[in-house]
Amino acid sequence: MNDKHIPRPVVKRLSVYLRRFQREAGRGGKTLTSKELAETLDITSALVRRDLARLSRMGRPGVGYDVAATIEQLRHILGTDEVRGVIVVGVGGLGGALLSYEGFTRRGFELVAAFDVDKRKIGRKIGGVLIHELSALPTVVRKHRVKLAILTAPADAAQDIMPLLKDSGITGVLNFAPVTLVVPPEVSIAQVDIAARLERLSYFTRAAHEA
Amino acid sequence: MNDKHIPRPVVKRLSVYLRRFQREAGRGGKTLTSKELAETLDITSALVRRDLARLSRMGRPGVGYDVAATIEQLRHILGTDEVRGVIVVGVGGLGGALLSYEGFTRRGFELVAAFDVDKRKIGRKIGGVLIHELSALPTVVRKHRVKLAILTAPADAAQDIMPLLKDSGITGVLNFAPVTLVVPPEVSIAQVDIAARLERLSYFTRAAHEA
């Protein structure tokens, strides 16, 4: 199973399939057909089957994909079959809220540490996660072999933190700071820009309003 | 200028162009070329020019797009040229953090009210925004003519809140609850699924690690 070079849109869909399979497992379902999956994503069954042809255990015509086996395989492909450590860098309001967010564990992520430069915060715990001084980041990241960071630092500090993350071995950054970061090729970055999402919604609501 | 039916990917790029123009304005720049914009988005200059052909004031060959005029036009298209009211529904950790988030105002959004069902929170203010009882939502939304809602309610409550939002006149929902919501056709929805973003990053970091 060569899963090293799956295109970004396919990875996105695999993640959505996984959620759908997990929901099905939660309600006791044993199989899901490509048609059911296609309806969830509003795509064609053919595309679902093509995406899931990456699995070693295929769906059976007229029966569908085995829920338990497919969850296992999708988690393996996505790299969440083992618990993966995540750090939170910047414990302002949003960083603090994410430390208390309980949706990570059941998706295979564990928040192992948080970092800030504010001395009043260091040594405190939020959601059971200890806040360290930023300078301790390389040691903590290496010790726990963390690859993923959630960056909730202020916009003007976010870019300056990137070299520290990279040099410590972080290879994936989920950035909440409302700036486009320049990252080295070894690091994958995903941007969560809340105001930009509102901006796009704004267009569609206005269009709906005026239509 | 017919801006009612701009496809979703184009709207997304217009929003990114706007951010780029605003950054340029912040550092005193007067013009931006399609080539500079293309580099920001890692797309072709031809695509930039095609996207921006929707503006009534075009770029000039060899000079580029006028920063101030283009910002004005993009904000008009996106509907953020007037301040737009937004409500936050569900004041847990994340909702509370968003109420304190200062990135909305300069993007043309104003948080006008928050809502929760927890009586201990009602009447309190976070980031200057008053928390109301959920039952007051229709009155407040109609009074301020709010069209946009940020939904930070718990996963199991989010779907139940949708009819209330829709009946109150909300036409755009930014959903942070980790569930796929069923929405009526009058309502546009955008999903911010933090764990799903980590999941996709996880794949790319693993691939980088093993490559």
Image: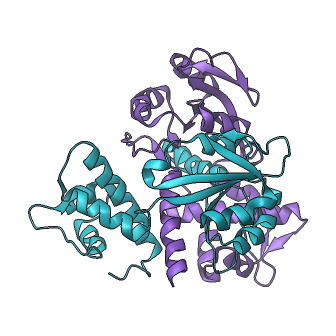
Chain colours: A purple, B cyan
Q: Residue at x 61, y 53 (%)?
A: B112
Q: Is residue A209 above or below residue A118?
A: below
Residue furthest out toward the front: B143
| Number of marks | 0
Could you tell me which quadrant the N terminus of chain B lies in? bottom left
- Position of A67 compared to B172: left or right? right
Image spot of residue A149 (x, y percent): 56, 36
Is residue A55 in view? no
Q: Is residue B47 left or right of residue A201?
A: left
Nearest the viewer among A138 and B110 is: B110
Q: On the rendered structure, is B175 left or right of A64?
A: left
Q: Is residue B63 left or right of residue A196?
A: left
**Quadrant assignment, res B52:** bottom left
Q: Residue at x 67, y 64 (%)?
A: B141
Residue A158, how many percent across, how many down?
A: 44, 34
Where residue A91 sits, quadrant-wise, is top right
Residue B94: give x, y in percent of width and height.
68, 44
Q: In the rendering, at what x and y percent does residue B209 appear?
A: 51, 40
Report whether residue A88 is seen: yes
